[in-house]
Image (cartoon, grey):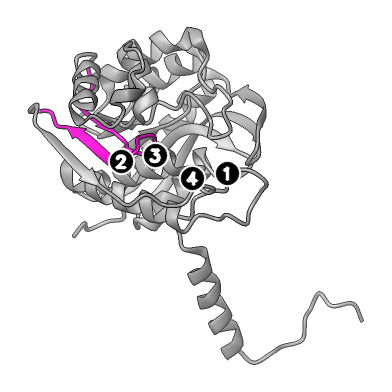
Amino acid sequence: MVDRTPVCLTIATSDSGGGAGIQADLKAFAAQGVHGTSAIVGLTAQSTVAVTRIEQVSPAMIVEQVRVVVEDLGVDAVKIGMVGTQASIAAVVEALGLLPAGTPVVLDPVMVAESGARLLEPAAHRDLVEGLLPRTTVVTPNLPEALALAGLADDPERADDDARVEEVARAIAALGPSAVLITGGHRGVAADTLLLPDGSVRRFAGERHPDGAAHGSGCTHSSTLAARLALGDGLERAARVARAVAGEAVRRGLRDVGAGAGPVDALDLPALRALAAGVADAVAPVPDALATP
């Protein structure tokens, strides 16, 4: 047991639809019982069907958000999400230098939104690989992102070939991260593949859930992983929990929200509504101070 509330920091972009990005990260942190803090890198005008506009926060503001959190609250683990541009990546690299040595860093290399919109500028790809990967404890791409990071061609016939996925993971590891976790959401078999720092491989199989509410699943996965590391879990245990939690969040996904891919539910909102309703029903009614006379 920890003797204080762990603090996680997400360095990522806001999703105005509340399904992914900063909003998903903070929900995932809360679901694991850690305090979530944030450094917002950019803003998206985003719904379940499209991303219509993206604006970046100034590099100086990115660094300052991290500095004040580190100096006052402390940071036990970091999750990095959508960073978008070369200037933002440079600021994030600078900000990571403010962390205490050994702070776990989880990088979710967000490149494309669930709606299909591209979220990483082509010119920023090299900066992400050369600037962020070597500073990362564990990187958590899905298979298409993993192939892009490794500079390997897609091979649809081998998407479910464990040997192929392991090959891709080792190619990414050669770029500098301590560990690589390729998630199974874009494979026929819903299995995560974890390449540990010692070169050994672990695979975590999971159930495939119905489509329609996977928006934010990658953010939830990587943020849960960061939260578990902040709580003191080892990498393998943290990865197992992240796989299970992300899968459950998709299973409970809000398929009645929005016209496109609904957001995952990391908090079990129906259960929270039922709890609140039970408390409300047990309280004697009082006059509504806001009611019109």
Q: Quadrant of residue 101?
A: top left
Residue for badge 4: 214
Magenta stretch: includes residue 173:
no
Q: Earlier in the sequence, mark 1 or mark 4?
A: 4
Instruction: Give the x, y percent position of residue 201.
Output: 13, 33
Residue for badge 2: 189
Circle 3: residue type? Leu
Q: Nearer the viewer, residue 6 or 182?
A: 182
Mark drawn on residue 261: 1
Crowd class of label 4 (few under 14; some 14 to 19; many from 20; radius 10 Å): many
> Label 2, label 1: how many angstroms apart (C-alpha)?
20 Å
Q: Earlier in the sequence, mark 1 or mark 3?
A: 3
> Label 1, label 4: how many angstroms apart (C-alpha)?
6 Å
Instruction: Give the x, y percent position of residue 287.
Output: 77, 86
Kindly check if marks 2 and 3 are in contact, taking CB atoms under 8 A apart as contact.
Answer: no
Instruction: Give the x, y percent position of residue 289.
Output: 79, 78
Q: Quadrant of residue 139?
A: top left
Residue at left offset 27%, top offset 25% = 136
Q: Earlier in the sequence, mark 2 or mark 3?
A: 3
Magenta residue span: 176-197
Relative horizontal placement of residue 283, taking residue 190 as reference (left or right) = right
Residue for badge 3: 9
Q: Earlier in the sequence, mark 4 or mark 3?
A: 3
Q: Nearer the viewer, residue 178 or 165?
A: 165
Crowd class of label 3 (few under 14; some 14 to 19; many from 20; radius 10 Å): many
Instruction: Single out the mark in the foreground, 4 or 3.
Output: 4
Instruction: Give the x, y percent position of residue 191.
Output: 27, 41
The local secondary structure at tag 3 comes to: strand
Crowd class of label 1 (few under 14; some 14 to 19; many from 20; radius 10 Å): many
Q: How many marks?
A: 4
> Label 4, label 3: how many angstroms apart (C-alpha)?
23 Å
- Does residue 280 lie above or below 258 as drawn? below
